[in-house]
Amino acid sequence: MNTKPRTETVAIGTTEPKPNAFVRMLKAQQFQILLVLMLIVLVFCVLAPDTFAQWSNFRLIIQNASILAVLGIGMTYVIITSGIDLSIGSVLVFSGVVSAIVMREMGGQGWGVAAVGIVVAVASGIAWGLLNGFLIAKGKIPPLIVTLGTFGMALGLAQVITGGIDIRQVPTVLTETIGYGNVFGTIPTISVIALVLLVIGGVLLHYTKFGLYTYAVGSSELAARRVGVKVDRHLILIYTMTGGLAGVAGILSLSQFSTTAIAGQSQTNLNVIAAVVIGGTSLFGGVGTIFGTVVGLFIPAVLQNGFVITGVQPFWQQIAVGAVLIAAVYIDQARRAAAMRGSTQSLWSKLFSGGRRT
């Protein structure tokens, strides 16, 4: 009988067997954030079962998060590329203002006028996104600086055009069909539109070459260039898409509030960025999911709603969301550091063992 110890040869550069899908799911930040969201919902259901734990209230939460969800799609792509876009709130306002002016000058309340307004809003957003992308990709200006500049420019132009006064002439077909309309009698139309865009954004990110290139650019722009990815063009496309989605959010906001709400979007960009990061998208690039963004969006929405219902000052929402945001970034940094240490130790052990393991 052979009693010699069994020797296994391992090639340098190979990795240990990956954990199964269930273990990976438990370790995923998106799943852990989902558990946090479920815990928050459970707490408010216990505290206010007759008011919070009602479909009408959940419907309101979903409706309030819908516009931010549309903005969150583009922001997820941007942050995965290790970029940032501080201008989306202002682009939303500008797109809504230009669209409202065009529809007011055309007159009428039908779909013909509304369709022109929708096209104008989306085109306005695309124009700002194209400007952001061109300056970042071709001008090599940091995204933080570019989008901070266009944040002020878009908001300033909206105020110049309107004199700082909100426009309230919105076609009734928009407010009745999109803003306050329902699908199947219970689901807000605005939420259905957001859901469709989320599904499209998720499929594009996770199942297409465009999404693969997005992760590649965020993981290593230099490596992406070396394998043939046209990084500049890809960045321009992503920022243009983000601007277009801000334009869509502008027309949705106009439909929901029946006004341009110029002063009501000052915190929109920061709220969206916080939600995307809380949902597991890494500020360092290369990591993120649309599902995580949706979960991250609902945490502040549920907190705000629950605090109002339970009589807690809504200012605590900012404190809670800020704490969760810091915790999410800390966890992301800790995981990256642990992964880097693990890969380094594995590499050195294989080198010193000569590629053999007993």
Image: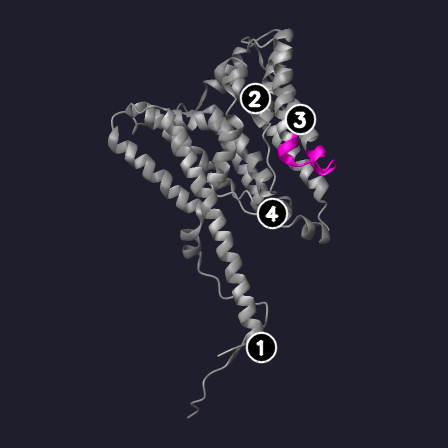
How far apart in space, not on screen, are marks 3 and 1 (Cα)? 55 Å
Looking at the image, can residue 354 be seen? yes
Q: Which residue is mark 1?
A: 354
Identify the amino acid type marked 2: Gly
Whether 82 is drawn above or below 271: the answer is below
Crowding around mark 3 (Cα neighbors within 10 Å: few <14, some 14 to 19, many 20+) is: many
The magenta region covers 133-146
Tag 4 residue:
215
Quarter of the image with the N terminus is bottom left
Q: Report whether 101 appears left or right of 190.
A: right
Gap in Å between the C-alphas at discs 1 and 4?
34 Å
Residue depth check, mark 3 versus mark 1: number of the one nearer the observer: 1
> How many numbered markers are drawn?
4
Label 3 element class: helix
The Cα–Cα distance between marks 1 and 2, rounded to whole angstroms, is 61 Å
Give the residue at mark 2.
Answer: 250
Vertical placement of 206 versus 67: above or below? below
